[in-house]
Amino acid sequence: MSLRVQPTRIKVLGREVTVLSMLNSAGARGLSVEQADGFDVEVINQLHVPTAVHWHGLLLPNAMDGVPFITQNPIPAGKRQRYDFPLKQAGTDWMHNPLRPAGAAPAGRPHGPTAGGSPAGDGAGRLDDRLPLDHQWRRLPQPQQPAGARGGGRVAIRLSNKTGMGHPMHLHGHVFQVVEINGQALAGPLRDTVLVPADGNCVVILAATQPGIWAFHCHIPYHAIDGMFTVLRYEGAEPRFRQPERMAATIQDPALPL
Ligand SMILES: [Cu+2]
């Protein structure tokens, strides 16, 4: 199965425009797969610039997550990259370019995403420290689990929002449970995004069973571009592709549709 990233002409309100599209092997939009067959897709970059595709919300190996400068290099113009992993979930998910949302206007913005910084906390995972949200790590007691849970343990993340608007914070490669909002305990559902209320906070807990370096960011595109973008790094995970400076430069370059 393939996914071609290419320019396509479409008509909007009677006017022809060029957009960037992702088309499957049949030349249509979307991918449809059987969970039992797993995910096996080759992304073919037919643009004149590098690109990447992120499989939003899927539990997958870190190297398959499709985030340039974090889990891989961008796919160069004219090249292709295969993504192959078992599907742990069924459902309908979103795929998108992780760095350059449509309509984003990076020029003149004061900050690129700053995913560097010093690790904080002593959890099984670690967060870098430049998110404009306060965040802290605490390690929870080891849950009663089979001895096979490598890297195991659970990690709680407290997200404190010091701004006057809510931020949907999205963590790649995991689901977490929301267990507290504004001091109120709850047994929330498992999810990969939590809306941190304006001038509020929340606590999420996740099972640290997905080693790697994972993007963790606000899902409002211009907030992510402005720097509300960090990573969750497991201890021992090697930052093989991680290049925060190149990522920032790429996002700031309006010529690149990355
Ligand atoms: Cu936001």
Image (cartoon, helix red, strand yellow):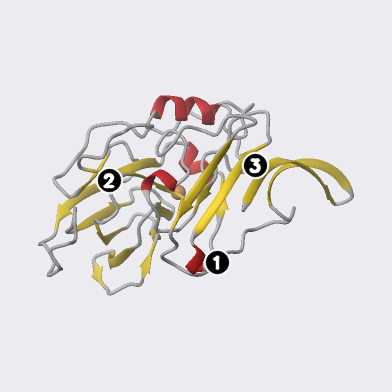
Left or right: residue 146 versus residue 253 is left
Numbered badge on residue 134: 2
* Residue of label 3: 103
Which secondary structure, mark 2?
Answer: strand
First in sequence, mark 3 or 2: give its number: 3
Labels 2, 1: front one:
1
First in sequence, mark 1 or 3: give its number: 1
Is the residue indicated by label 3 positioned so its CB lies within 8 Å of ligand 1? no
Percent coordinates x, y for residue 39 in the rendering: 51, 57
| Circle 1 Cα neighbour tier, 10 Å, few/some/many (<14 / 14–19 / ≥20) | few
Q: Nearer the viewer, residue 249 or 161?
A: 249
Residue furthest left in the image: 141
Percent coordinates x, y for residue 126 in the rendering: 23, 44
Left or right: residue 135 versus residue 11 is left
Percent coordinates x, y for residue 169 in the rendering: 40, 53
Residue type, numbered disc 3 = Gly
Residue furthest bottom in the image: 187
Tell me which residue sits at (54%, 45%) in the image.
53
Residue 244 visible in the shown view: yes
| Circle 2 Cα neighbour tier, 10 Å, few/some/many (<14 / 14–19 / ≥20) | few
Q: Do tag 3 and tag 2 residues touch (Cβ < 8 Å)?
A: no
* Residue of label 1: 92
| Circle 3 Cα neighbour tier, 10 Å, few/some/many (<14 / 14–19 / ≥20) | few
Tell me which residue sits at (37%, 47%) in the image.
62
Labels 3, 2: front one:
3
First in sequence, mark 2 or 1: give its number: 1
Tell me which residue sits at (74%, 53%) in the image.
27
Residue type, numbered disc 1 = Thr
Query: Label 1, label 3: how many angstroms apart (C-alpha)?
Result: 24 Å
Labels 1, 3: front one:
1
Which secondary structure, mark 3?
Answer: loop
Tell me which residue sits at (28%, 74%) in the image.
187
